Image (cartoon, rainbow, N blue to C red):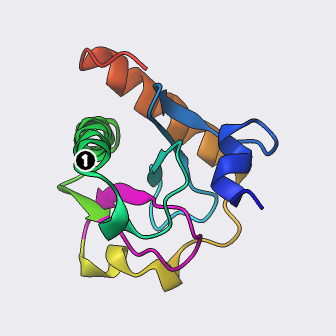
Amino acid sequence: MASVFSMIINGDLPGRFVWRDETAVAFLTINPVAPGHVLVVPREEVDHWEQVDDDLYLHLTEVSRKIGKAVKDAFDAPRVGLLIAGLEVPHLHIHVFPATSLDTFDLAKADQNPDPADLDDAAAKIQASLRKLGYAE
């Protein structure tokens, strides 16, 4: 059975995408720890991050770095967090989010009911920042 992320990637479930390429996608999580919380996900279903091949891992981290720069710019964040938890969905995903303190890294404190308009606004800000920084989707 396809993971929930594969269903989003394939268009079977909605997603607020900010990045798409032939290897990876990035979209806003529906449970953000902060506005602008993005998940970077390989198109290929890989459950455990340590099982991913080197080329894919390098690509995912490069996409995460670009997304991180855009998130920092879009939300004027003092830092950008990066986290691979690997417990929520059995499909590798890298969390990238504006970080103001260590509390921001606590996924248990994520917003379980964010306003969809706020998520749309965050996606638009990140997309605009990616364009401004010269990163094509």
Q: Name the quarter where the N terminus is drawn.
A: bottom right
Q: Name the quarter where the C terminus is drawn.
A: top left
Report helix, strand or loop for mark 1: helix
Q: Is residue 68 magenta?
A: no
Residue 69 x %, y %: 23, 38
Residue 75 x %, y %: 34, 44
Report the side of 2 relative to 25 (left or right).
Answer: right
Residue 20 x %, y %: 49, 28
Picture mark count: 1
Q: Residue at x 46, y 78 (%)?
A: 107
Rendered view: 57 above or below 18: below
**CA neighbours of label 1 inside 10 A, class few (<14), some (14 to 19), many (20+):** some
Q: Residue at x 40, y 81 (%)?
A: 106
- In the picture as drawn, the residue positioned furthest to the left comes out as 78
Q: Residue at x 50, y 32 (%)?
A: 18
Residue holding disc 1: 61
In which image quadrant can residue 52 be found? Answer: bottom left
Rendered view: 18 above or below 2: above
In which image quadrant can residue 100 be found? Answer: bottom left
Report the side of 2 relative to 103 (left or right).
Answer: right
Report the side of 24 relative to 77 (left or right).
Answer: right
Q: Amino acid at mark 1?
A: Thr
> Which portion, as a residue range, is magenta?
83-100
- Principal secondary structure, stretch drawn in magenta: loop
The residue nearer to you, when weighing 114 against 131, is 131
Q: Is residue 85 magenta?
A: yes
